[in-house]
Structure formats: C-alpha cells, structure tokens
Amino acid sequence: MSQPKIGVLLVNLGTPAEPTPSSVRQFLKEFLSDKRVIDLPRIVWLPILYGIILTFRPKKVAKNYQKIWTENGSPLLNFSVKQQQKLQALFEQNVESEISDGELPNATFKVSLGMTYGMPSIQSGLDELAEWGADKVVVLPLYPQFSHTTTSSVKDQIDKLESNYGFQLQFINDYHDNAQYIEALKESVASKLGQGKELQVDKLILSLHGIPKRYVSNGDPYQSQCEATAKLLAQELGLQQNQWELCYQSRVGKEEWLTPYLDLRMEQLSAEGVKKIAVLCPGFSVDCLETLEEIAMENKDIFLQNGGESFDYIAALNDTDPHIQMMASLIKQSL
C-alpha cells in the first residue's frame, strides 16, 4: 500500500513585506478591498478607500510597524514560519505513528504556509503541496473564533483555487472551545500570573479583535464564540467574575462595534479600583501589530496615564509547544 501524503496549509491574515508607507499601502489595498472585511457597496467604499485611507493612513501605520519590526522582519510572519517548522517537526516525530493506527497507515505530512493578504500567498502554499504530491490537504486558518471577516475570506480563496488541484481539501472552521487550546491559554496565564485566588493582578483582561456589531446582527457567530472562549478560560483558571473581563479592540470608523471597547475600559478601570492588570489576546495565534503595538504599547500607555499602576501583556501562544501540539491534534481529528 502506498503511503498517504497529507498536506497541511496553515493560514494567517498577512503582513506588509516592509515597514514602509509603500509596502503598507499595498497591503492595506488588498486587505480593505476584501468584501468580507468591508461589506459596504463598492460605489460607496472605493472612493473612501482610494481617496482617503490609502492616501493618508499608510504613513501612520508604517510608523507603528517600525516600532515592532525585528531583525527577522515582521513578527507575524516570523512566528508563523516557526509554527510551520515546529509542526512539521512534530509530525515527523510522532503524530504520523498515532494516525497510522487508524485509517492512514504510514502517512507522511508536509506543512506549508499561506497568508490571506500579502506573501506567501494561499495559492503558493497550495502549489507547494501539489508539487509534493499531496493526496489530501487540511486547511487550518489560525483564527480560533470563526468570523466571516477572517475565516470566510480564507474559504473564499480556497473555493476559487480548489479546482486547480487534484487533492481533497478538508477545512477547519474554528477551535474556540477546543480543550487543548483552552489549556494552552491557561498555562500561558498561570505560569506568569498564577490562578484563582492567587492571581497576581486585580483583573485579567481578555482582549479580542472587534468587528462591527451589524455583522453579528447579520449572523456572524464571532461574538458568541469569543464569549465562550473567555468563559471557558476563566473557568479553567478558577477566576471569579470580578477577576476577569472581556473587551474588544481595534475598532475604526464611526459605526458601532462590539463592546466594551478596550481603550475606553483602559481609561475607566483605575477609577473602579483596578490598578494592576494583565492583558491576554486569545484571538491572536501569533503576536503582531495589534498585540505588540496596540496592546503592549498604546493601551498600556492609556491605562497608566489614567491612574493604573501595573500593566502586563501576556504573549500570544506563538510557537510554544502546547500550541503546536494543539494544531497537530486538530489536524489529526479532522482526518
């Protein structure tokens, strides 16, 4: 019997190639042209995008990227590559033997990487797996909570490209309540702050990326999944209701987004007697602009300038072993 060849495509949002206005402009153009992200009529949105946003915003955003850029480039891409490499190594070490007990004897695996916007593209990741000779490909968008603004954008591209390849495609929609995911989050918090009554801050803030409230009203399950993740994590940590709080970050424009807004809560918490906080972003699988600059710098400053005394940012799961093991289990279960 021939060895089944299983491809794995890890997908994240993407990043500018460089922290420059021109590179950021190209990235924002691709990102904000996606109808899943901005669902306004094109006749309304495109003049705003090209006339205002792509004219004025790239310079400001590029400065923010410059604050977090490393000698290895974009943190999002750097951590994503490490995830790819570690998952590949884990499959080679032991996951194959686990799966071989089931319906895939002696399966071999290859892990590739794709970004919804920018490079490496989703198509380049699928091309790599096709050239390798994959029989089946599991697509894992690294968004724990499903949203049409993120996960469905990946699915849109997969659906357009699928007919170009001869392999079967398996798509993982979300893992917001996956036990290993919650346990990995718990470990990342507990190792730094303790848990239950021993929690070493006044409050743990769980910050997730916001979306317009209208999207949820139209059926997007994102908010309910964010709330489920937060409650499961608080339960595993043994936290009382007054020890944690769910907030939403990164809102733009005048439309109402999911609340409570993180930046407003940063202004209010000290007056409520909350002086020491830690912030975890359980919706981000890797650290990126929205965590390293918006949370660990911008919102930290807001909290401290409004009477806060201590602010800790807890890193994303990134390429930690529990995170990689969770990915392997998700893929194994999907097969």
Image (cartoon, rainbow, N blue to C red):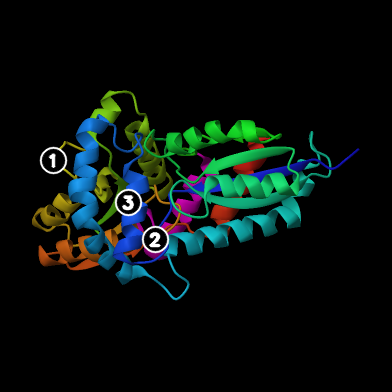
Residue matched to label 3: 28
Q: Is residue 8 left or right of residue 254?
A: right
Q: Is residue 33 left or right of residue 155?
A: left
Q: At label 1, which amino acid type do we have?
A: Lys
Q: Residue at x 51, y 39 (%)?
A: 178
If you read the primary sequence from the N terminus, does the residue marked by circle 3 or circle 1 appear first? Answer: 3
Camera-nearest residue between 104 and 196:
104
Marks 3 and 2 close (CB-CB < 8 Å): no
Residue matched to label 2: 194
Q: Residues within 10 Å of mark 1 (few under 14, many from 20)?
A: few
The secondary structure that most of the magenta stretch takes on is helix
Residue range corresponding to the magenta coloring:
178-199
Residue 74 drawn at (x, y percent)? 42, 65
Residue 25 drawn at (x, y percent)? 31, 56
Q: CA distance from mark 3 to mark 1?
A: 19 Å
Q: Is residue 137 magenta?
A: no
Residue 133 drawn at (x, y percent)? 76, 44
Of the 4 image quadrants, the one containing the C terminus is: top right
Residue matched to label 1: 254
Q: Residue at x 66, y 39 (%)?
A: 137
If you read the primary sequence from the N terminus, does the residue marked by circle 2 or circle 1 appear first? Answer: 2
Marks 2 and 1 close (CB-CB < 8 Å): no
Q: CA distance from mark 3 to mark 2?
A: 39 Å
